[in-house]
Image (spheres, helix red, strand yellow):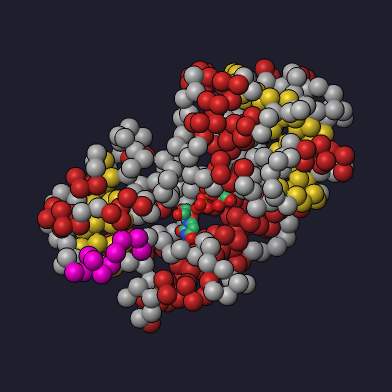
Amino acid sequence: MGSKIAIIGTGYVGLTTGACLAHLGHTVVCADVVQEKVDALNRGEVPILEAGLDDLVQEGLRSGQLTFVMGAENAVAEAEFVYLCVPTPQGEDGSADLSYIQQAAAQIAPHLLSEAVVINKSTVPVGSTRVVEKALGRSDVFVVSNPEFLREGSAVHDFLNPDRVVIGADDQGTAIRVAGLYLGLAAPLQVTDPASAETIKYASNAFLATKISFVNAIAAVCEAVGADVNDVVLGMGYDKRIGNAFLRPGPGWGGSCFPKDSHALVRIAEDAGYDFGLLKGVIDVNEDQFARVADKIERMAGGSVDGKVVAVWGLTFKARTDDLRDSPSLNIVGRLRQRGARIQAYDPSLEDASDPRLEGIEVTPDPYAATAGADVLAILTEWDEFKWLDFDKVGENMAQKRVVDGRNLVDRTGLVRRGFTYEGIGRS
Ligand code: UGA
């Protein structure tokens, strides 16, 4: 028998959580504040690019186990469990802004069933479980932390095949009730206190960001000493203590999570009296990486991009998503535009240039059009399809056959054979 669940917020975490919980047999009502979004979702139209999510939403709508409503208060009346999945954007001082969480909690408080469990899935500073308890002001409902570890682009897969489920609760009984929602998932379950659960989330993202900054720093060393970072990572990864996951060099890390969460953790530590110099260094290396890749493209264009045409493949923060938030590609493109470059860009997930963040960029309908008359081609996200394009045609299109491969994605040997000048990341 499934449980009755409400989800507050239908961003990629809320929507994935709702659709997956309905798939697991629960009855789920999702609430949002945007009428058009709610209407579209009730028609089975998913506003984000997320593998497998359309199918699950449509399955839930057909079975009646998934519905969408306007307004948090209209979702919770019968709910035994309420997930808070609202944004926690970065505030001006780097800390996470909790106002959406507090608003949502205050809004649902009068409508909650007695004994309901409010589950915090938004990424929140340590201690926020208490903030939610306070905003709810109800001694007969429980609040737990249950952080999400979903990657955009594979969120459905990650939800249904988690590495672990972490539940931070003050009492064992509530933790067991929440654990029951995930029966059927083959994953280790960790029950801990709320502060530790919240810290697990921040520490995990900070560690992953550290791995990437580390490999990008090693890539810089490789360039200086004449080594090949791909071989270095391969050699390191055979050591089981290191592993090879999350050690792909690139243009720097971005997205809606790592930048915000790393800054927030620096701030959390600072407020608690600890100077997290290591994590500050990780953030600095990342900022440097944007600059290094922009400089590399400029050098490849002949020392200046002023008045030059730079073709860019990939604008989102990584492949298999249409998310432009904190995209390293857009950061680098911004730097090049400031230096006078004309940008012709293609991204498989973007149909047009209607997003205001793309202002000043000529978005082309296919990858070849982006290379027309270009002085240099920069590959900035790792879409698989970029590997298999006709590089003879690309070469004929370009004014100069020069490629900066910001993801070490394409076949260097093949390109050199076709007369391209090629530079990757960390490969001299
Ligand atoms: C990240 C975490 O991976 C999830 O576990 C977490 O749940 C999520 O944040 C979150 O907090 O909600 P996501 O932001 O979707 O997921 O993106 P990642 O796949 O982690 O990639 C982040 C950035 O690192 C991207 O810009 C990506 O291109 C870059 N990256 C990743 C590399 O440059 N090299 C790598 O080896 C891996």
In the rendered image, residue 236, in percent from the top left (x then y), is placed at 52, 75
- Would you place residue 201 above or below residue 23 in this image? below
Image quadrant in which the C terminus is located: bottom left
Magenta stretch bounds: 408-417
Residue 421: x and y, percent? 21, 68
Identify the residue at horizontal 52%, vertical 25% (top origin): 58
Specify whether 269 is left or right of 354: right
| Residue 398 image offset from top left, x and y in percent | 14, 55
Which of the 4 image quarters holds residue 115?
Answer: top right
Nearest the eye: 41 or 303:
41
The total of numbered circles placed on residues is: 0
Q: Nearer the viewer, residue 222 or 46?
A: 46
Q: In this rendering, would 269 be left or right of 232?
A: right
Q: Residue at x 32, y 66 (%)?
A: 424
Task: Say which of 314 and 206 sits in front.
Answer: 314
Q: Is residue 415 above or below residue 396?
A: below
Q: Determine whether 87 is above or below 235 in the image.
A: above
Give the quadrant of the N terminus.
top right
Which residue appears at 39% of the width and 46% of the height? 316
- Picture quadrant where residue 399 is located: bottom left
Residue 22, magenta (yes or no):
no
The residue at 41%/71% (across/down) is 230
